[in-house]
Every structure is written in C-alpha cells, then in structure tokens.
Image (tube, helix red, strand yellow):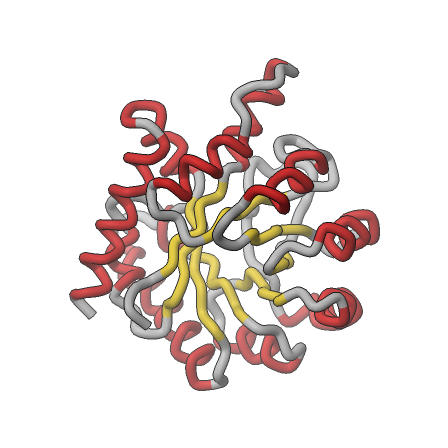
Amino acid sequence: MERIRLGVNVDHVASVRQSRGTKYPDPVFAAFLAEQGGADQITVHLREDRRHIQERDLEILRRTVATALNLEMAVAEEILDIACRVKPDMVTLVPEKRQELTTERGLGTAEEGVLAPAVARIKDGGIKISLFIDPEPEAVRSAHRLEVDQVEIHTGFFADAPEDRRAAELERIKAACSEGGSLGLAVAAGHGLDYVNTRAICHLPEVEELNIGHSIIARALFVGMESAVRELVNLMAEGFAER
C-alpha cells in the first residue's frame, strides 16, 4: 500500500440543495471536482427518507464517477433493490434512524442475524461489501463471520471525545483495526474526521481507506472543492509517511 485512499462523501452538497428544493448545488458535479482534487472514491448515503441524496443522483454518479462509487445504506428492501440494480463498486451497510442528524453509531454483534441475508444478496450481485461498525474487536469478528470484504471503523466517538477521553477512544480504534488486520479484512475508518484529527488515524498501520464528508464540504465553502480535497489528500500522505 503506497498511501491511504480517500473516499469523499458528497451528501452535504445534496443537503443544501434539498433545503430549498432547487436543482443546485449538484452533488454529481461536486463528485467530479473531488476526483479532480485527488479523491480515490465517491461515497454517498441513500437514506430511506431521501433527506439528501436522491435515487437519480446515485444513477448519474454510477455513470460518471471515474474512480469508485461507495453506497452507504441501511438494510431496507427498497434500498437493497436499488443497490442491486445500480451496482456501485461497494456497498457499506450502516445503521440508520429517522431522527438522527447523522449516523450515530456503528453496527454491532446484535445485528448479525439481520445483516446476513443482506450481505449474501449484495455479494451475489457481484458487489463488494463493507460494514460500518463500532470500534470493538467483537464487532470486527462478527463482520468476519459474515464474510464481508471490509470493515469501516466508526471514528465518531474519538472525534467527539473531550481531551481527557481522546486517547482512550483512539486505543479502542487501534484494537478494532488490529483485529481486522489479523483476520484478513480490509480496514477503513470514518465519521467526524477533519483536518486536525485525521492524522492520528493515518498512523494506524491497518487503515487503508478513510471516508470523510462534512469537514471537506465545510472547507470547500472557503477554498473550493478541489483544493479542499487536495489539502486532505496531502495531510493524509504526511500522516501515512509517519507510520
């Protein structure tokens, strides 16, 4: 591995569009600019309530993304049908509830029975499968039992932790990443990462991919999408070199 891959989540571009019911700003064009800035993957979350990304966005992105398309989704029959029809490069299964502002936690062992049929269906469709999981070794082992291709470790607890808890939360992530590596799983990470806390995650030897959205879109308001992505790609390269 020469460097850590960056998946850029463009959901919040669609959030701005949906807030006024306009046709702009366009998450598809944002994805194009992100790739121009060095993104290795475009990530979108098609929620059941369609609060940001719409089915049409996903269909156009499937035709236009030049790198890889990662679809985040809950285990819902309607969304499974869409995923199997559109065929993104990867599906990342995530927990979802209507009242949350953003994904609050990762999947755990309690969901294993519910996840198994969805994982099998996605794999049968020839699509790679990842699980967004809490930073717990047992959650990693559960994912391994489901024979997924990748785990994405939830970094939100670390990102939101007060200073006196941050080191402990980082240790939880380290343990989960180490377990994933020992089981032969590809290891990604994401949620709440920004231009300050990302470097610490880049130091973890098992991490191959980061998925980041909100902080990039926020930075893009001031410097543009290409520059915002390029800055983070460079920051990640520096963190990778420090391993």
Residue 36: give x, y in percent of width and height. 37, 40
The residue that appears at 31% across and 56% down in the rendered structure is: 165
Q: Which of 169 and 198 is in front in this view?
A: 198
Query: Quick check: 153 left or right of 193?
Result: right
Query: At 28% from the left edge and 69% from the top edge, which residue is drawn?
Result: 2
Q: Quadrant of the C terminus?
A: bottom left
Judge by depth and name the residue closer to the eye, 114 or 70: 70
- The percent coordinates of residue 242 (x first, y second) are 16, 66
Q: Is residue 226 above or below residue 8?
A: above
Question: In this orientation, does residue 114 appear?
Answer: no
> 20 above or below 171?
above
Q: In which quarter of the image is residue 210?
A: bottom left
Q: How many marks?
A: 0
Q: Residue at x 35, y 24 (%)?
A: 221
**Is residue 176 visible to the viewer in this orientation of the structure?**
yes
Image quadrant in which you'd find residue 100: top right
Q: Residue 17 appears in which quarter of the rendering? A: top right
User: x, y percentage for residue 202?
Assistant: 28, 61
Q: Determine the residue positioned at 49% across, 71% down.
A: 136
Q: Is residue 86 above or below residue 243?
A: above
Instruction: Specify the quadrant that holds the N terminus.
Output: bottom left
- Left or right placement of residue 18 versus residue 40 in this view: right
Picture coordinates of residue 77, whole percent (x, y):
83, 53
